[in-house]
Image: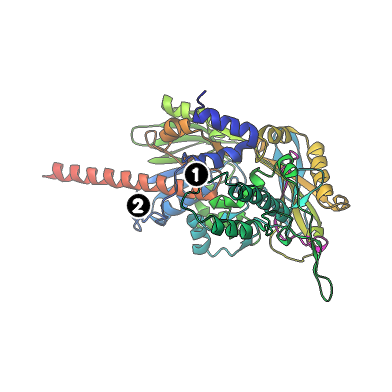
Amino acid sequence: MAVTRRAFLERVGRAGGYSAVYLSMLGLGLLRSPAAYAGPPDLPEGSGSGRSVVVLGAGIAGLVAAYELKRAGYQVTVLEARDRVGGRVWTVRGGDRIVQTGMADQRCAFDDGLYLNAGAARIPSQHHAILGYARRLKVPLEVMVNVNRAARFDYGESPVTGAQAVNDTRGRFTELLAKAIDKGALDRELTGVDKAKLLDYLRAYGALDDKNLYEGSNRSGWAEAAGAHARRGAARRPLTLQQLVDYRFWGLGLIFEEDVDQQAPMFQPIGGMDRIAEAIHAAVKPEVRLGSLVRQIRKGENGVAIVYSDSTGAERRLEADFAICTLPLSVLRKVDADFAPDVKAAVNSAFYFPGTKVGFESRRFWEQDDSVYGGLAWTSRPSEVVWYPSGDWNATKGVLVAAYSVGFLDSEESEKFARMGLSERLAISRAVIERLHPGRSRELTKPVTVNWGQTPHSEGVAALWSDEQRQREYARLCRPDGRIYFAGEHISYLMAWQEGAVLSAHEAVTAIHKRAAGEASLRSGLRRTLAA
């Protein structure tokens, strides 16, 4: 029976979670390859004079839109419901209050200088737009260690290092291929190929012996470390093929860095991911109104009207020539808006998946005792990923992300983790650390947790569009509704990345500027005609 692409992706989602769906869509060619970055909108200084734009939301998309419009001379007002900017770029520090719907408020107690990137936490080197703002606004960056073969995979009876998981998998499957070639099982497929040279390559690639068997390799790490004098070292005993299958090493953890957006080098702003958002905010601070909750959006023939409640609770009305709406669709669908029916349908159709992080302050035992410097550890537990901090190497303390759960391996388990109460989330996270670092879970202190599904004004990590939705609902939101334009990571093919938010803001700003220039030209021509 034929399987449709949609049915296939649904099965992938049930088996491997949201990220598996994303990677499958990339492999099937359902997500467009990004074009070369041409730079920010080239709007002449003063070209927007006399025109006004209201921007809804002060996340990355809203801040970037305001920054570019202000530079061109537009009158800009940004309405943000939170008491901070950045949206899902949120760095939690000591003294911060964490509000979660359905959960008691938390107060972060981290020591000075320590922080948790509760949302965005890494920037790929290929994301030129967001890196461009960091460079332009002089936000210092450091390398973020995304993959570390010393970090562990915990899918079986006991954890193994990433080095062993990767290299034993390569060795076992290379051995199978070498045997097939050696026994002539692939003769038809290898017509014209020098099999001897191919076997030589496979021996080197998979660390096979002269009998084309995989008996282990020091690539997988040492059972006894090599040293001076007579200490030649001994490689770990290799995992069997059955163990590799049982341990689910085929999952995303094994191929994580193969995704182009996860490949080294990765970057992070020194001191917290919110440094870039704050730098953009500093350039548009007079235009940003915090504590301003949008309640009503109305279109007009010549402009838009926004009703919102300000930080005192008073109701306000704001009119402008254009609007850029960057609110997450999970939030926007609850706003009273007179959108066109197909726009409302598109807004209501978007699915936002939850995502949860748990952070602890601790002695940096992962570095000091186990020599794990940055990177991710993977587990089959619903907490999914342990994220070791990059930077401040060999400091006494750090913040360990003991859970980063967004459906990498099992979307149902991730959703279950998101629904858990504080104590259950923390207990699972501690248990995972205990398996990875025996005896060290007792050193975890000052816990905080953020679930984006429970975070007011976000209500989810990112929009997950199906292929069919990309052709219909997504495509509709790429076009304006009257004088209202849409931007945000959800109006991009870079799901959940700051880069997508930036590029969508550039598209909206460019479209508004082109329209405003056309209207100005039309008015000027009309005046000349009347004068004649």
Closest to the observer, 64 or 430: 430
Residue 450 appears in the rendering: yes
- Tell me the kind of residue under disc 1: Arg
Answer left or right for 388 relative to 436: left
Task: Specify the farthest residue to the bottom.
Answer: 229
**In the visual, does 162 lie left or right of 305?**
right
- Residue at figure coordinates x 59%, y 30% from the top left: 11
The magenta span reads 367-384
Question: What is the spatial separation of the Cα atoms under label 1 and label 2, in whole angstroms?
Answer: 70 Å
Within 10 angstroms of label 1, few (less than 14), some, or many (20 or more) residues? Answer: few
Residue 368 lies in the magenta stretch: yes
Q: Nearer the viewer, residue 472 or 92?
A: 472
The image quadrant that residue 248 belongs to is: top right
Q: Amino acid at mark 2?
A: Ser
Q: x, y (%) of residue 334? A: 55, 29
Sequence-wise, the earlier of marks 1 and 2 is 2
Q: Is residue 484 left or right of residue 188?
A: left
Q: What residue is disc 2 on? A: 49
